[in-house]
Structures are given as C-alpha cells and as structure tokens.
Amino acid sequence: MTPSSADVDLMRGALALAIEAGNAGEVPVGAVVADPSGRVIGRGRNRREETHDPSAHAEVIAMREAARELGSWNLDGCTLIVTLEPCLMCAGTLLQARISRVVFGAWDEKAGAAGSLYDVVRDRRLPYRAEVVGGILEDETRAPLERFFRTRR
C-alpha cells in the first residue's frame, strides 16, 4: 500500500515523540493512533527505563491512550503510526486491539513482526490481520535510533 500525505504528517508527529524518548534516555521510538477520521487519539513514546515496565513500548502506550479516549479496547478502523516496525509484543497487542492499519518508518531486521523477521500482523492463520505500510520516512526515523545505539557501543 502507498502512504497518504496524512500518514507522512502523522509519522512526523511520531518522530517528534521518538526524539523526546531518546532525549530522556529511552530507545527513540514514538507512536500515534489515529481514528478513522485521522484525528490523533493516542500518543506514546518508549518509557521502559522511566517506568521499569517491560511493556512500556511506544505502541502499547499509544494504544492504551486511544482505548481510554474511545472508552473501548476495540480500535477497529484506527491506524497505528510508529517510527519502528512493531516487535512481537506490539504486533500481538495491535491485533488484540483490532487496529486496522499499521504504518511504520524504519524496518527492524532483528525484532520486527510486521514483515521483516516475522509477519505476525498479516499472518493468515490468525483470526485478525491489519494492513501494513512500511518504510515511511525511513531515513528520518532510522537516524535517531542509529545515533542512540552508536553512543552506547
């Protein structure tokens, strides 16, 4: 699928959250959830170090906020926009939340579960699948990750 101009704009918002996470000492990943009209209803950035919570990934935080905003765990029709391809945990969570569409920036060859290492999000054996659009603003979304990990090696 091809990204829309709205996808690119939403990715820029997720990227700002990723940079905020990196400045706070977290792996720089940011995410937003948009409702079917394109309105942002959830925002998240990695907070694992801050909260000592292994599930505090940007995607999970954004989906929790979106669910609170809608008053329902069911996010059918919503789009998750995230700067890094979702991991297995986040892929499972977005499927459980019934997210309809996932748009991500950088591919994650080591842990990605939306098309690179695994393709859980589109696995036909599962009862629910989401549309996937990857590689949006890939260079811009990869840059904060590369800087972050370069300083830790």
Image (tube, rainbow, N blue to C red):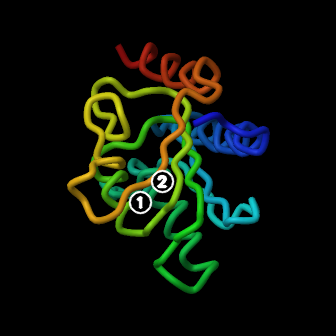
Mark 2 or mark 1, earlier in chain: 2
- Identity, as a three-letter code, of the amino acid under mark 1: Leu
In contact (CB < 8 Å): disc 2 and disc 1? yes
Quarter of the view holding residue 30 = top right
Q: Establish if 106 lies above or below 118.
A: above
Q: Nearer the viewer, residue 92 or 2?
A: 2
Q: Which residue is mark 2?
A: 59
Q: Quadrant of the C terminus?
A: top left
Question: Going 51% across and 48% down the picture, which residue do you hit?
Answer: 102
Image-based side of 53 in relation to 44, left or right: left
Q: Position of residue 152 (x, y in %)?
A: 39, 19
Tell me the quarter of the image containing the N terminus. top right
Q: Position of residue 36 (x, y in %)?
A: 68, 65
Q: Is residue 76 left or right of residue 153?
A: right
- Mark seen at residue 94: 1
* Residue under the point 65% across and 26% down: 137
